[in-house]
Image (spheres, coloured by chain):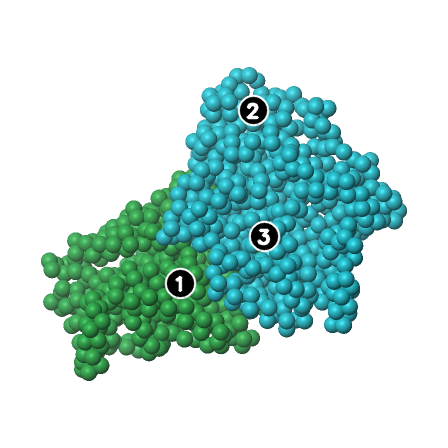
Chain colours: A green, B cyan
């Protein structure tokens, strides 16, 4: 196992030993309470594992022995920690339940296979024996993609891929690499960097998510503008299925019918388990240049990103916060600092330049050799200037870069303080972005007020555009709200439902890079159509005739 | 019908009125005979239609009337010309049979629907009545994609999409356009150019092929380096199927499971008929700059293209001929001209520069605004110079550009002169290109000698790289050979089989942009695997439960 599960938080984010950076910062909680229209935030600590009961395992000793015959008995885990750790992913909904100790389903056993053959043997056994399988990569799903759903099978195991983390090959001529799917982000990148290469896929979950997971849910790294989403860099894959191994096409740009590789992308463990992948690599960038811009409003910032995407400016990242997100993070970062002279000067300067009250910050990142970086930076700066933006230099860019994986760490302390925090994302054509943005933001704000624990309470709804394409872009919403402690799950469901309905009504996809899992099932028919769902069901039936693979995810019954 | 079928050659290429540019050029046929090791080339004219019999139609008058009820009786064609025209595509194999008058299958009727609803109604009728359907776009398939295969159905119709050629919408903000699938290349491009836009998809068949056809077989335009293959520019599609209409996802970069759009790409009419497509458009290029380079050998030219693709130099086209192709076309273009002083000087210069005897010509095309063109040209020229290539200026580029759609026109005169000519293409990772090139070239040369009509006869086998990707490239082979007139089809099958076996054995795909049709069926299992084919069969079964759609293509039984 490349990452020791016992050193990770089983009901939260990251290493158990990581210190809470917000501990003792009462000023933050006071400020946040004001933002949420609450008199104060309540203490809502998580229950420790030893106070929590897990459902009895259903598999018999002979089942466990048969599983152990395949992977070795030391790689079959049935202890409480492992079962609780693998009971769910890490969505807000998951955390609510895990922290409350409401664990009504958990895998009977957790298996740690050492390679594709063992995975294949496990699936054959489970298929024969009617045991459901949840594939577990990093377990960082935020849409209910890794929950212990047994369906109508007699038992359930989690197959944890973290024991499959070898680099298999690099082809320096074709600029491709092949690795086992359970490799984590940092291990993969450092193996590639040692050869002067990079995949460049750095999602916010980078430290704790895996190659296979990125593929199975069509993930996007923060620098997808340059390095692409999983569907851009995946070249071929091997999928272990109950019907046997499926090896997808190993050539570029074939015209020999639909591409099997495309069916692995977004399959979320429902067709099988990605055991190995070959992907495009690039020479590691010589330079990395992140810098800030301040736009007058969201519309002009959006226009700048659109132009850059349509002119194919090779920026690594263009990340535009809306007015509320810009304001919120600036206020947060100033907490605990005396107001500085620089702040006054900045404010005066913005007023002089007739900037409105809610300007929008954009972080632009450029990576590559000197020529690429200089060229992309110059071209983007020209667009930004024409649209009236202020260049803020490298400082804000460097600050963003340093904190780029920190977001999820602040979720646990917020959960400890009666505060709900969740994110969702969508994507749409450029011509629909404005209306979609307004509709989802409005839906979230209203739903939070409507479900709030008291009158006057409200949410903080933040949005950024962080992935752009010639035809459209993603919108990423973060919403923070005071929890209604007597009906937390219902509150979350209501907010989520209203936002999702707004997405569908305004031509957005239900997910840009988090995937479907259990949480987006209800909107899949709107997205794929009845016939489209039948096609997905037929593919699943072919590869997984008995429906043992990750039941209850991706495809509605 | 946007193109009048009666004005096109039913058994060859292009407008019937187009003059044979090679007529009376005895010097050419004498030279070609020498190239092929033949004492002379025989006259092998095609049989005129009035000497040829077609199989009796199987559908009854009431069937024809029912079809006419849907599209109008004037849009149901049952005359000999229409049936013969739609009996086959335009592969070498097709032409052999059409020219010999061996038409053992033809559609009972040809239907010209006016829109998606009529197509949908036709499919519903045919599904109910057990009538097979061949979707017919431009009919330019060169792999047996449009042949009148009835399977075990009681009748067969061709649905000709040329009556569905409307532009439906343009979204200038998202840079997308939507059109009916039957629109031909020239009509589509002129509609877009009128708005200052382009799709940029210009295959050699551009004049006579359709949007829907490009999508259904994952086509590539000559400038795919910049504008992408169909799988790059297709954003969403509508597919009429026997089970109803399937509308694919209308957003960018969704993570909501596998993408239905990807299943339409390469579906070759076996799942349904593409009725409408939305695709990425770009601003029409302000500049177009095509120029020639001469490389010392195929390896250094290949390296230059690889570098350009991996560095993402935004060239529109990089097209490298191997030594034989360079020599053959130069010799051909000099026929009928007295040897010019310039030729002597050129030869002397090349000797001085120590160029080998078989240098390789590369045509590089650059399209876009001034900055893009200048930048891409400068970056590519730098690579070419470093690899020892000579820059030949714009003249060779302009010559190539003028003749870029002419290739297929010379096939008919060659067929009139006892000469066989066919093309095939593959693609592979860069690290496999050299071995694949040698193997396929060797297989073609040997197979032609082995199947030749007389001892000493041989083929001309030409190759170019014309589509490149960061991970690999396509190889496009043209092979010209003296026909064994007593066993023409067997001869072609043997040559094709040996080349295809060599492709598969050396890690290439059976097609880069021509598709599967009937001709590549035998290699699909090697490419997709048994389980992979089961997946394709399951998709077909879901959308076309009775197997009426384009029987005998794409998926082996």
Q: What's the mark number on residue B226?
A: none
| x then y, percent, for residue B221 | 56, 50
Q: Hey, which quadrant is residue A11 in on the image? A: bottom left
Does dot 2 land on a helix, a strand or a loop? strand
Q: Which residue is mark 3?
A: B222
Image position of B322 (left or right of A244)? right
| Picture layout, residue B374 above or below residue B403 | below
Picture quadrant of residue A157 = bottom left
For this rendering, which residue is in front, B363 or A405? B363
Q: Residues within 10 Å of mark 1 (few under 14, many from 20)?
A: many
In the image, taking residue B436 as reference, residue A112 lies left or right, namely left
Q: Label 2 crowding class (10 Å Cα cut-off): few <14, some 14-19, many 20+? A: many
- SS label for mark 3: loop
Q: Position of residue B45 (x, y in %)?
A: 76, 33
Whether residue A236 can be seen here:
no
Snapshot quadrant of residue A143: bottom left
Marks 2/1: CA–CA distance: 50 Å
The residue under label 1 is A308
Give the image location of residue A272, x and y in percent. 49, 53
At x 77%, y 40%, the residue is B24
x then y, percent, for residue A500 = 29, 51
- The chain holding disc 2 is B
């Amino acid at each position: 196992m490349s990452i020791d599960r016992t050193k990770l938080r089983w009901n939260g984010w990251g290493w158990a030993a990581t210190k809470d950076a917000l501990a003792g910062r009462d000023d933050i909680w006071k400020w946040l309470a004001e933002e949420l229209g609450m008199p104060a935030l309540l203490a809502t600590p998580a229950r420790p594992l030893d106070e929590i009961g897990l459902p009895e395992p259903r598999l018999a000793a002979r089942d466990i022995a048969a599983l152990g015959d395949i992977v070795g008995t030391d790689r079959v885990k049935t202890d409480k920690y492992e079962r609780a750790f693998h009971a769910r992913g890490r969505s807000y909904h998951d955390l609510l339940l895990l922290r409350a100790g409401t664990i009504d389903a958990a895998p009977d056993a957790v298996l740690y296979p050492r390679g594709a053959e063992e995975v294949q043997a496990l699936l054959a056994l489970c298929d024969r024996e009617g045991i459901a399988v949840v594939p577990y990569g990093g377990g960082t799903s935020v849409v209910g993609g890794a929950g212990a759903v047994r369906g109508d099978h007699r038992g359930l195991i989690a197959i944890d891929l973290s024991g499959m983390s070898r680099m298999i090959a690099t082809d320096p001529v074709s600029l491709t690499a092949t690795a086992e799917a359970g490799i984590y982000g940092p291990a993969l990148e450092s193996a590639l960097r040692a050869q002067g290469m990079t995949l460049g896929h750095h999602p916010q979950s980078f430290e704790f998510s895996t190659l296979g997971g990125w593929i199975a849910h069509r993930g996007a790294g923060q620098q997808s503008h340059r390095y692409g989403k999983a569907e851009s860099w995946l070249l071929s894959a091997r999928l272990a299925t109950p019907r046997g191994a499926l090896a997808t096409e190993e050539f570029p740009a074939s015209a020999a019918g639909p591409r099997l590789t495309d069916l692995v992308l977004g399959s979320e463990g429902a067709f099988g388990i990605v055991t190995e992948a070959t992907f495009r690599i690039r020479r590691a960038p010589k330079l990395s240049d992140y810098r800030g811009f301040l736009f007058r409003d969201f519309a002009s910032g959006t226009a700048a990103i659109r132009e850059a995407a349509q002119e194919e400016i090779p920026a690594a990242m263009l990340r535009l916060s809306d007015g509320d997100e810009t304001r919120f993070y600036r206020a947060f970062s100033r907490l605990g600092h005396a107001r500085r002279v620089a702040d006054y000067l900045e404010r005066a300067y913005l007023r002089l330049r007739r900037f409105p009250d809610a300007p929008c910050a954009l972080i632009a990142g450029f990576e590559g050799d000197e020529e690429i970086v200089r060229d992309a930076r110059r071209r983007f700066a020209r667009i930004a200037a024409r649209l009236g933006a202020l260049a803020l230099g490298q400082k804000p860019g460097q600050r963003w870069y340093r904190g780029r994986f920190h977001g999820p760490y602040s979720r646990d302390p917020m959960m400890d303080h009666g505060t709900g925090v969740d994110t969702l994302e969508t994507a749409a054509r450029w011509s629909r972005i404005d209306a979609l943005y307004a509709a989802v933001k409005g839906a979230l704000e209203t739903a939070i007020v409507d479900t709030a624990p008291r009158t006057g309470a409200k949410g903080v709804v933040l949005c950024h555009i962080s992935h752009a394409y010639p035809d459209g872009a993603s919108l990423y919403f973060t919403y923070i709200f005071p929890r209604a402690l007597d009906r937390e799950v219902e509150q979350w469901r209501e907010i989520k439902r209203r936002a999702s309905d707004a997405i569908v009504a305004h031509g957005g996809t239900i997910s840009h890079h988090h995937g479907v899992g259990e949480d987006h099932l209800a909107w899949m028919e709107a997205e794929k159509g009845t016939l489209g769902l039948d096609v997905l069901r037929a593919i699943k039936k072919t590869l997984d005739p008995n429906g043992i693979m990750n039941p209850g995810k991706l495809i509605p019954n």
